[in-house]
Image: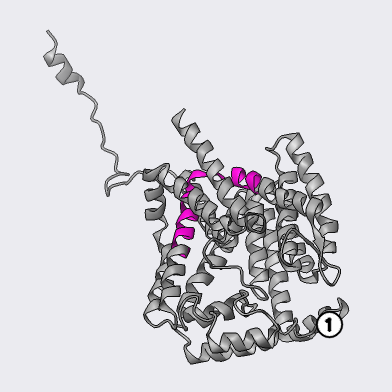
């Protein structure tokens, strides 16, 4: 009974924390407070298990620890210290959550949380200056990102064989609603990026009935296809991207992103290993940041970035910190991919598709790693869920029987002498 109450409490606290982060446009300034309150209660509600989760996955804390260390050379050390501590708290919440909430429960509560945002956008949404639908969010990009994630969640709910028929029907409705809403957001990038993620969920559904050799053959073909695609983009990526953008009516420079990338690379070259300090570039009063805000007609302090995860984060925490982030991002994708192949189900497919979506968006947006960030939490959680699953499979795998050790004389037969009839006669009474 106690375990059941703790499970329900953990689910409710996770729901509250996720609601604050996903629906921050509706919560406003109280979003961070609600998240911290729910996260702290989640940690202290079962301290032994929380401590065990942190001890088990402590290497992930090297990232916030490095961010905190950058305060030693940061341009704004107080910013680096404060935001590093908040990032550390966010990571700990993600670590504790993975030990208290199952992937199936997480998928269902995310469907409810993101569904609230979708319903609110339909009921109270508005249109932006260029005709794009903004919903209840501040920009079309934020709205498109929310709808893209909800589309994947709804599809996973629909494909989940263990969910109630009514829940799966809600998933069908949610997926059907998300398609036109994504079109209304007028985000060609979101549409192109969500397509392969939908393919991951479809592929997971199909491989459920395949045998081991058939799975291996299928994924070998996919690996060859991805390698060929990567080679194509490496050699003709710029030309293809320009053609795609021109065909969709978008700016070939990605609305000035390429100019930002050049500027960011110049700052990385100045301090390639250690960076300028965590959260120490986009600061009001810092001349280079003020210049970029003015150049792109953005109000000072509006939360601008270099629109590339690797460039933006390397500017502040250097290649060392970026390397730790890459391990979490791509390590999470690889471990969850391996676990999904071994145990193909809807929750695993969802986590893998969301991680792939984050990777695709990382080249034009900056979503990780920040304090009070739902994407940062999911990035860490995916790595842990995947690793936990693989470790469980390894523990439960049947071990082959050990052959009994044989000595040098194991094949030597000792002859048994038959009793002599004479001897037996002499001993007889």
Q: In this view, which residue lies farthest toward the top?
A: 429
The answer to which image quadrant residue 58 occupies is bottom left
Q: Nearer the viewer, residue 23 or 15?
A: 23
Q: Residue at x 73, y 75 (%)?
A: 229
Q: Does the rendering let one see residue 403?
A: no
Coordinates of residue 304 in the picture (x, y in percent)? 63, 77
Secondary structure of the residue carrying numbered label 1 = helix
Which image quarter is the C terminus in? top left
Q: Is residue 284 left or right of residue 253?
A: left
Q: Is residue 119 left or right of residue 268?
A: right
Q: Is 366 drawn above or below residue 296 in the view shown?
A: above
Q: Residue at x 54, y 77 (%)?
A: 313
Coordinates of residue 329 in the picture (x, y in percent)? 56, 66
Tell me the colour scheme of the image. Answer: one colour
Magenta highlight range: 87-110
Asked if the magenta segment contains residue 94, the reply would be: yes
The residue that disc 1 covers is 243
Asked if the magenta segment contains residue 233, the reply would be: no
Q: Nearer the viewer, residue 428 or 406?
A: 406
Q: Residue at x 66, y 79 (%)?
A: 299
Q: Residue at x 85, y 63 (%)?
A: 184
Q: Is residue 74 left or right of residue 159?
A: left
Q: Does the rendering let one see residue 191?
A: yes
| Magenta residues, dominant SS class | helix
Q: Nearer the viewer, residue 194 or 26?
A: 26
Q: Is 309 drawn above or below residue 413 in the view shown?
A: below
The answer to which image quadrant residue 236 occupies is bottom right
Coordinates of residue 279 in the picture (x, y in percent)? 50, 75
Coordinates of residue 403 in the picture (x, y in percent)? 38, 45
Q: Is residue 329 left or right of residue 204?
A: left
Q: Residues within 10 Å of mark 1 (few under 14, many from 20)?
A: some
């Amino acid at each position: 009974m106690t375990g059941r109450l703790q499970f329900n409490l953990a689910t409710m606290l996770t729901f509250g924390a996720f609601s604050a982060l996903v629906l921050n446009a509706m919560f406003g300034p109280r979003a961070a407070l609600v998240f911290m309150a729910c996260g702290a209660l989640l940690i202290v509600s079962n301290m032994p298990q929380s401590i065990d989760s942190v001890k088990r996955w402590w290497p992930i804390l090297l990232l916030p620890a490095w961010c905190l260390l950058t305060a030693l050379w940061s341009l704004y050390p107080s910013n680096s210290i404060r935001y590093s501590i908040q990032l550390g708290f966010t990571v700990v919440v993600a670590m504790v959550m993975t030990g208290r909430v199952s992937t199936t429960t997480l998928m269902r509560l995310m469907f409810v949380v993101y569904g609230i945002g979708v319903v609110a956008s339909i009921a109270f949404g508005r249109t932006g200056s260029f005709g794009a639908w903004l919903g209840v969010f501040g920009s079309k990009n934020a709205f498109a990102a929310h709808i893209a994630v909800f589309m994947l969640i709804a599809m996973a709910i629909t494909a989940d064989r263990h969910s109630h028929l009514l829940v799966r029907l809600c998933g069908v409705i949610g997926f059907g609603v998300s398609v036109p809403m994504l079109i209304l957001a007028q985000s060609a990038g979101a549409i192109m990026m969500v397509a392969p993620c939908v393919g991951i969920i479809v592929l997971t559904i199909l491989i459920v009935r395949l045998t081991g050799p058939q799975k291996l053959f299928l994924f070998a073909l996919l690996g060859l296809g991805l390698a060929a695609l990567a080679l194509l983009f490496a050699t003709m990526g710029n030309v293809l991207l320009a053609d795609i953008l021109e065909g969709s009516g978008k700016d070939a420079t990605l609305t000035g992103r390429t100019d930002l990338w050049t500027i960011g690379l110049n700052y990385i070259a100045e301090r390639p290993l250690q960076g300028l300090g965590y959260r120490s570039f986009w600061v009001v009063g810092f001349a280079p940041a003020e210049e970029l805000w003015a150049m792109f007609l953005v109000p000072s302090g509006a939360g601008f970035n270099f629109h590339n995860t690797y460039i933006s984060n390397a500017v502040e925490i250097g290649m060392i910190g970026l390397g730790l982030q890459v391990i979490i991002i791509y390590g999470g994708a690889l471990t969850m991919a391996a676990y999904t192949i071994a145990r193909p189900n809807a929750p695993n497919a969802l986590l893998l598709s969301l991680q792939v979506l984050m990777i695709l968006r990382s080249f034009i947006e900056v979503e990780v790693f920040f304090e009070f960030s739902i994407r940062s939490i999911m990035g860490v959680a995916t790595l842990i869920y995947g690793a936990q699953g693989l470790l469980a499979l390894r523990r439960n795998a049947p071990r082959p029987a050990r052959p009994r050790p044989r000595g040098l004389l194991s094949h030597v037969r000792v002859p048994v002498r038959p009793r002599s009839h004479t001897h037996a006669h002499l001993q007889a009474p």
